Amino acid sequence: MTSLNFVDIPDASQRSFAQKMDREDPLKEFRGAFYFPKNEKGETLTYLCGNSLGLQPKRAREIVEEEFQDWAKFGVEGHFEGRRPWVSYHQPLAPMLADIVGAKVHEVVAMNSLTTNLHLLMATFYRPTKTRFKILIEKAAFPSDQYAVASQALFHNLDPKEAVVEISPREGELVIRTEDIEAYLEEEGESVALVMLGGINYYTGQAFDFPRIVKAGHKAGAIVGFDLAHAMGNLELKLHEWDVDFAVWCSYKYLNSGPGSVGGAFVHERFADNPDLPRFAGWWGNDPETRFEMKDTFIPAHGANGWQLSNAPVFTMAIHLASLELFAKAKMSRLREKSIALTEYLLFLIDTIPQDKFEIITPRDPKFRGSQISIRTLFDGRTLFGKITESGVICDFRNPDVIRIAPTPMYNSFDDVWTFVNLLKENVA
Ligand SMILES: *Cc1c(COP(=O)(O)O)cnc(C)c1O
């Protein structure tokens, strides 16, 4: 990929330059693997909303159709006779997920949905005692996460006002400082049972410093978990190496696996074979060797598989498979490299516009952001967003005043970025 110092390139703000970047993009072939939404005139829209719902891989329908065929042909025998036997449908997904999150294969599993997995893993890993009972989360976390941690506290007969501690940006600042998380854990760590942060905050786009937070959490004696909703398929993660205790994700954002599709979880291997860990069990989490003996005692399967509840939702996993095959081909390291180039280019172009009507709230340092850039509007943001949408760009607006843009490296182009900024420029002039 060409140099990222766009400021030093005389024609970098020209559309022709963006198109040249696209021609040189080693990942350009992947754009053709997805369906792009169109308007009523049949014109293709510019899609910058992969942080909310990723686009449909063209191959997804084919794999789902194959499962329909196997169901029709085999009935119940499809569990064993199908071309991808349903009884072990989740298994081939694990190595691909492990590559994406930087884990060992037995540390990951595709299952359930994000919030369900959050609860399941908190059932195991949030074990408050009289003195150590707090959950540390980021201020203004995604509502589902706030409800989940508060309800876990209530479940243990604790008052969420005391048990849930929110860490905020400093007065006048936009994002949370890692040293403030460390300082809290240094001072109050003895009372913290669980550090539970989003890998990337959905609103500001801030990416957290995983290794430093894990270190600080562990030093305080707490468990450290991450909600990877916005980090999965976006950042280059090394969950195993960073020593994260557990993590959960959904697959319909950057992972392009379809609305409400199957989620996933990571459990560090140090918990892989501990039958004494409390958990909410189901038959699919039982050791596959004895699962069909239908015994009355639960023997957890090795690793993350031991947290499964139910048999595999084959149809959403079929879509997931289509998408993960693309990730295996594209590779997270290359995707991340392109993602940084796209956001650097986006910020470079935005900086050519006078910024008296908006400000960027996402950290400028690529280490602390993924594909998403959040633009806070300082005037009537809804109207601006409406105009951009009418002109053919799909992005999103979060109350009260933020437009979120996420050029995703799998299928977005430098020209998409140029198109958006050109509209922004026209509409704030
Ligand atoms: C998208 C998102 C969710 C959604 O949860 P589901 O259980 O998949 O509906 C939850 N938390 C965060 C941080 C998210 O970004």
Image (cartoon, rainbow, N blue to C red):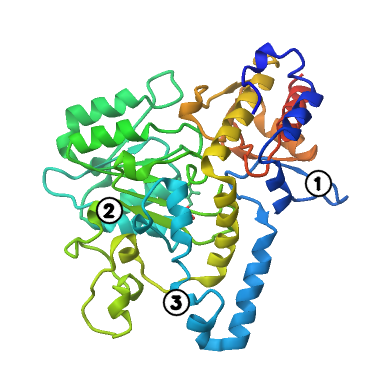
Q: Closer to the N terminus: mark 2 or mark 1?
A: 1
User: What residue does disc 3 label?
Assistant: 87
User: What residue does disc 2 label?
Assistant: 269
Q: Quadrant of residue 418?
A: top right
- How many residues crowd mark 2 within 10 Å: few (<14), some (14–19), many (20+)? many
Does the residue at mark 3 contact the one at mark 1 (Cβ under 8 Å)? no
Q: Quadrant of residue 223?
A: top left
Left or right, 80 with respect to 122, comes to: right
- Three-letter amino acid code of the residue under disc 3: Val
Measure the alpha-carbon separation of dots 3 and 2.
24 Å
Residue reaching furthest to the right: 41
User: What residue does disc 1 label?
Assistant: 44
**Which of the image's four quarters has the N terminus?**
top right
Q: Closer to the N terminus: mark 3 or mark 2?
A: 3
Front one among 104 and 396 = 104
The residue under the point 36% across, 35% down is 210
Where is 311 relative to 122, above or below? below
- Three-letter amino acid code of the residue under disc 2: Glu
Where is 296 relative to 159, above or below? below
- Three-letter amino acid code of the residue under disc 1: Thr
Give residue 368's position: percent from left, percent from top.
46, 28
| Element class at badge 2 | helix
The residue under the point 66% across, 51% down is 55
Can residue 249 be seen at all in this image of the molecule? no
Front one among 387 and 239 = 239
